[in-house]
Image (cartoon, helix red, strand yellow):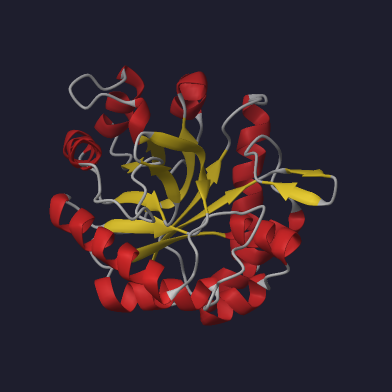
Amino acid sequence: MSGVGVLGVGIGWRPEIDRTVERMPGVGFVEVIAEGVRPERLPESLVLLRERGVPVVPHGVSLGVGGAEPLDADRLAHLAACAEALGAPLVSEHVAFVRAGDLSAGHLLPVPRTRDALEVVVDNVRRAQAALPVPLALENVSALFGWPQDEMTEAQFLGELVERTGVSLLIDVANLYTNQVNLGLSAMEALDTLPLESLAYVHVAGGQAHEGLWHDTHTASVPDPVLDLLTELCARVTPQGVLLEWDDAYPADAVLESELDRIRQAMARAF
């Protein structure tokens, strides 16, 4: 993705581990949940990281580009303000359904991969791109169920979305693994089909198995199969950034540093 630059290996910044992230060696960039910050009063930790030259990417979780209603102008304005305040190289969000009217799903739900849904997403993405001061990257989501009316694979859906809007991709290899376990969707086939030339950066994360399903909890060490998928992705394209997500049950600093080292090792195995 042009214009973003090399980000390196990063970690999701969270208030609970702000000092940890500040002290951690070798962090190339961080990602902050956009809904958790106020652009007019940024957390001191993020200001410090920016002063050190560490790029900060706002990551939205509530825009809902998969909804049939027009995108909320206030949410778009907040994303834009976050990007401006943080001097962000890009903004990222999800290809997901999150609300209808005043009702929120409380989760990032998969969008039916149909032609009609694609038209909606394309329109919403174009509106978002027009409102944002920096490029937009969209993430594939994990799922516990699939829609019976799907007409395309996820890779085909995302490929057409990229072709029609020029949007970049944030590929979450943990989500590819989740959907392989839960829905039988081949992660390797997705990597072979996705337009990786439009890759902005990559997510990795851990999860938990429960009653035959894999839950993308972001509260555990990254499993080896997810790191194997990262290696496979890096064998196909050199990502400009790879980021570890860890959102609760935070471990000791040394554990998080070890996870970043495992990511670096997985990337190195591709070369």
Residue located 65% across and 39% down the image:
217
> How far from the left and from the top, in percent, is residue 250?
63, 25
**How many marks on residues?**
0
> How far from the left and from the top, in percent, is residue 96?
45, 53
Left/right placement of residue 185 relative to residue 73 reads right
Residue located 61% across and 52% down the image:
263
Q: Nearer the viewer, residue 225 or 125?
A: 125
Residue located 55% across and 44% down the image:
244
* Res. 120 image quadrant: bottom left
Q: Nearer the viewer, residue 94 or 99?
A: 99
Residue located 31% across and 20% down the image:
43
Kindly tell me whether residue 198 is visible in this rendering: no
Question: Is 157 above or below relative to 259?
Answer: below
> How far from the left and from the top, in percent, is residue 32?
39, 35
Q: Among all residues in the image, which is located at the extreme right? A: 211
Left/right placement of residue 263 relative to residue 66 reads right
Kindly tell me whether residue 258 is visible in this rendering: yes
Question: Is 257 above or below relative to 215?
Answer: above
> How far from the left and from the top, in percent, is residue 180?
70, 65
Q: Quadrant of the C terminus?
A: bottom right
Q: Quadrant of the N terminus?
A: bottom left
Left/right placement of residue 109 relative to residue 36 reads right
* Res. 219 image quadrant: top right
Question: Is 70 above or below relative to 169?
Answer: above
Q: Nearer the viewer, residue 252 or 188?
A: 188
Left/right placement of residue 117 relative to residue 163 reads right
